[in-house]
Image (cartoon, rainbow, N blue to C red):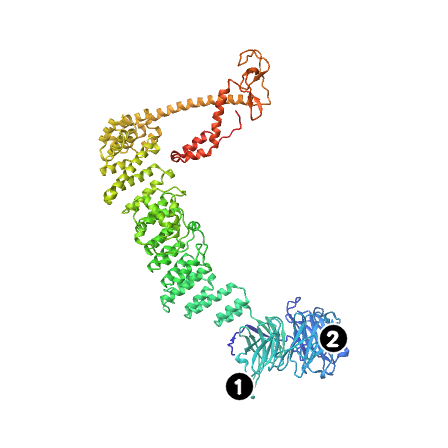
Amino acid sequence: MSIAWKQFQFYHSVPIRDPLLGNDNPLYSDPNLTAITMTTDHDTYNTSLLIMATSQPTVSVQIIDLQNVSVLAKFNVLEHNHKDYIIAHLHIINNNQWLMIMLKSTIIPSQPMIIRFYQLNKLISYNNSITPPQFHSEVIISTQRDNTPLCSFDITPDLSLLALSYLNGDIIVVRGDIAHDKGSRQRKIYSGKDPILSIDLVPTVKDYIIIASTLTQILTFSTRGDNKGLPTSVLADNLSLQLGGIVWDPVQLKIWVLDTQERNLISFKLNNEREIIALPPFLQDQNETLISIKHLFLLDSTHLLFIVEEYPRQHSETYQMIHKFVILDTKNHIVAFNTLVQDPILEYLGQSDNKFSLLSTNGVLYQINKKSFDDVIDVILSKNDYPLAIEFVERTANNKDKLYQIHEKFATYLFNQGEFLDSVNQYVLCLPIIDVNEILTKFSSDSSASPHINDKETNHILSVFLWSLMENQLANSDHITLLLIILIKLNRIDDLNKFIQHFNRSGQYTKEILHNDISDEEFFYSNKDLFDLQLIIELLRESNLLVEAYELAKSFSKDPILIVNILLDDLKEPQSALNFIKTLPIDDTLRIMCQFSRQLLNSLPNDTNLLLIEIFTGNYKPRGNSTKPTPLERKDSELKKIFYSYTAFLSYMNNHNRSGSSSTGQEKKEIERITGGTTYHPPKPSLIFASFIDKPFQFVVFLEACLETYQQFEGFKEDLQEILTTLYDLYYELSTSDDIERRKDWKLKAEEIWNKSQSLVEEGEDDADDEVDNSLMMLISHMNGVHLNDKTNEKDFIVNTFNTMTLIEDPIKCWNFFLSNIDKEPKLYRVALKYFISNEEIVKTIGGDLVIREKLIGPSLENDLIPLLDLVQILSTTDVIRFSLIQDLLVDHFNKQETEIDNNTKLIESYESELATKQAQLKELLNIEKPTEINIKNQNCYMCELPLELPILYFKCGHIYHKRCLNEEENTAANDISYKCPKCILELESSNKIYNEQTNVTQDIELLETILNTKEGQKDRFKIISEFIGRGGLEYSHIDI
């Protein structure tokens, strides 16, 4: 399977020639170099150290600090008895802890291989050209099968296990405690026909296993020697492998092999899982050139280094071999580096994941460093490969700002390419760093993109961007408004519903559907501006998206009037509107009904009237949440049934609801609610009177309900009179306009209303605060030709007549009527005073201020017909009478009041003095500890009036008697004999009787409740409670009389 490989230069190579080239003692360009390796960055020197071995003039090792071009250590390795040996391999073990030196004989092939282990830190700064440093431990590998060349080796970090593979097919394992120089032993675990090209020790749960490769197979072996000369398993077969083309990945636990026949890179895991990757075309043989991959190295878990030679198929005089090395990113299929070198690569010197070195045959050291992360990203962006750059940042760096910047560049690139939708999707991914308004302008209809896309596409692109702003909580009210406008224009109903279901009242978009949002009260007092609700509702209405308008208003409108308006005017759903109104608090319900009750009465007269009765009788309570709009299911005749009295209405609605024919289950207990306990003081019924225009029968039901339930609220009598007056007028109107058979009934009802009004007027005659004026009813009677003198007594007739005259006659006639009838009805003073001072012209007509003072104000005060405070209150209702007119009267009144206050103060002081004396005497009498001194000399018995003789009885009231003169009384409570003073017994019994009555009053709660529930008690409960407290209802005494 062919793979598209992307090519970049993520590394840079620096060729470093030997600084001592041409010197007698060159470094890595020494032709006698036999082995070389390099440490990772050393802790002490903060750089990598180069370790090299030479064979001439002596077999020696040098440790070189390349950064400072200095030789840190140089020493011989061999003793005199090993002069025919050279250093074949150098190997760093366990992060610079150990240096392994492998020596082999160049003269006698049968000589064993010597492997020595040194502690690297001890070798640094060791300079002794004569005496070799002491090695830590040594392993001798015995020669077998003609000492064939070593192909590969591997050793564990703790030096406990060493494995070697040979060209003749042998595998030798060395076990021991080499780290502590406690000896080791070796064993040949396999001997095959094919060369063992590579060998790797792989840790398992219990021990290490060996993965070895031949020319055609990948095998596994146990290191315990229990394999009986056979491989444990065969991972792969029928391959075409080469020396140097196999590498083990210890991180991902897989082996990479180069299949030279198929030119594929194959990975195998221990569970037989494999992956085949086709090499890039330039690593495949071409028509005119041949490609030879000399060696394969592992840089990290995703990067492999290839040492490559390229030469033509046909040799010519100008033939020149090309040498290069390539780095492949096997995960992302990227050629991370590809460069040419002048000479063949001699050795790979690994240092770390981000840097390594290569030594060429002409003594040039190539240092290859991976570019910084930012440089790598810049390389990718230079080729406009933004997706790869994004993938790199997401995988290798936790740098959100960098990622945002790439997304922004990618978005700009796509915009310039005309891929506007993909561009806005990229802008969405970098919202925290972009200017939102600039992007909105960029994609608007007036931008440079407008010639290339139509309005619908522009709106779609803007909706994607705005929706993402909302989801990421970055949208302000203007953005949300614009988003909703676009969704409406595109007619995306599903997205509108999704917005309503997920956007909460706090201005946040949630992934889950909203079930519990903030309360209506909390939302009402919040000052957060979510979006232009009024504008959006109007657009929804214009687009005929009425249900969506209702749902949006229900969720986000702080004024329920908007919701009701949509239900009534747009959706034509009066029943749903009424159901919604019933869920609101009383304040909102009252406000809405004042505005929409007339409209609701036209559609649902009885249901609406029932709700109005609840509201204005103080029995309204909010129901549960309303559901979505539902059409009416009841017949029009049922909805608009006419009732002629509240009693009939109440009976029908009660039966109707119990039968289950109501459109909502919540109406089942409507009537019971009306007669239940009140939760607030009911508003004035007059607020809603205008809604009943052309609805006389519904108006009758409403007024009768208000009248029937009025007494329990103890409201103002003016309000009650207003109801009586309106109902009185309505009855007489129906007595002339309704059907003939009902006209008489209406008149009889009107007479009942008049009688109730008269009773109300009479109740207020003794109290100025409760005074009631029913003169308007008299005018209504006059207009309807009703004679009231037959229904009232003479005094009431005089007052009523005067009230009527004030409405239809001139002031002179009213004044004459007042003068001629004032002796008959003194109450006429109050009514006349209110009328005659109501207008300055009236005052002038009857004679001016002096007449008012002499004929009205003066007699009222002298005869106590009008209390002073009431008089001042009446005079203050207009600006006609000046203060100077009554100044003298007020001064005289205040002087009298002051004199009376002084007299009362003196009386109080005398009572207090007497009370203090009585309390002192009582305290002395009740003091048991202090004996009372009795003077019996020249004293006589209060009963027989003879001189006192013992035994005598003395009472604390001061009376003394012979014991024989008194009658004994048995004290049943104390089971003893007691005596009572004959002179004080009557007073004592009277006091005990008063005390017992007070005690009974404080304890007889049933009596108090009975009085409160009477008609008089309901009328003035404060008076009853005050009298109860005055009788000692809150007092408690321990004193026995």
Per the image, the residue denoted by label 2 is 185
Residue 50, percent across and down?
Answer: 66, 73
The answer to which of 462 and 950 lies nearer the viewer is 950
Of circles 1 and 2, which is in front? 2
The answer to which of 957 and 836 lies nearer the viewer is 957
Among numbered discs 1 and 2, the one appearing first in the sequence: 2
Q: Amino acid at mark 1?
A: Glu
Q: Amino acid at mark 2?
A: Arg
- Residue furthest right as drawn: 81
Mark 2, residues whose alpha carbon is within 10 Å: few (<14), some, or many (≥20)?
Answer: few
Taking the image as shown, residue 437 lies to the left or right of residue 91, namely: left
Is residue 724 positioned above or below 262 on the image? Answer: above
Taking the image as shown, residue 814 lies to the left or right of residue 945, namely: left
Given contact means CB atoms under 8 Å apart, are the residues at marks 1 and 2 in contact? no
Is residue 287 positioned above or below 440 on the image? Answer: below
Asked which quadrant contains residue 37, the reply is bottom right
Asked which quadrant contains residue 869, the reply is top left
Residue 535, percent across and down?
Answer: 36, 56
Q: CA distance from mark 1 to mark 2?
A: 53 Å
| Mark identifier at residue 288 | 1
| Mark identifier at residue 192 | none
Residue 304, percent across and down?
Answer: 58, 75
Give the mark count: 2
Taking the image as shown, residue 185 lies to the left or right of residue 391, namely: right
Residue sitting at 74 percent across and 83 percent down? Answer: 110
The answer to which of 749 and 914 lies nearer the viewer is 749
Task: Say which element carries label 2.
Answer: strand
Task: Say which element carries label 1.
Answer: loop
Is residue 701 positioned above or below 473 on the image? Answer: above
Residue 393, percent across and down?
Answer: 52, 67
